[in-house]
Image: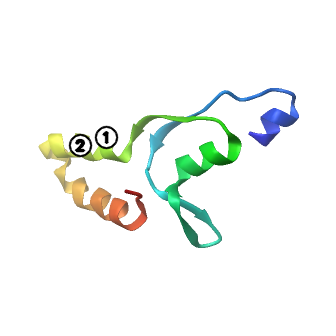
Amino acid sequence: VEMIRNAGAEPCAVLIALDRMERGGKDGQMSELSAVQEVSKNYGVPVISIGNLSDLFTYLSADPSLAQYKDAVAAYRSKYGVE
């Protein structure tokens, strides 16, 4: 974002493919905000995702052939996710 602003332009949003819905923070300190919320707050632009971890979990739950991955995604969400 700073590189874009330094070039004389103003970004209108950040687009990401997957919002992993994980806690933000730095230097080992976890934030109450998600990483996406921190980017939006710090740079003053919305962050738009094509999908998020909840969407992925719903997709995995709906397809029996992908059920083997549900526990790993749930563990990731439990360890790193925000409510």
Q: Name the quarter where the C terminus is drawn.
A: bottom left
Residue 69 appears left or right of 78: left
What is the crowding at mark 1: few (fewer than 14 residues within 10 Å), some, or many (at least 20)?
Answer: some
Number of labels in the image equals 2
* Residue 21 % position (x, y): 43, 51
What is the crowding at mark 2: few (fewer than 14 residues within 10 Å), some, or many (at least 20)?
Answer: few
Q: Secondary structure at mark 1?
A: helix
Q: Name the quarter where the N terminus is drawn.
A: top right
Residue occupying image coordinates x 58% and y 35%: 46
Query: What's the CA distance linking mark 1 and mark 2?
Result: 5 Å
The residue beneath circle 2 is 58
Please tell me whether residue 29 is drawn above or below residue 14 in the rendered image: below
- Residue lying at the far left in this picture: please name it: 64
* Residue 7 % position (x, y): 87, 31
Residue 55 is labelled as 1
Amino acid type shown at disc 2:
Thr
* Residue 14 % position (x, y): 61, 34
Q: Classify residue 26 by image quadrant.
A: bottom right
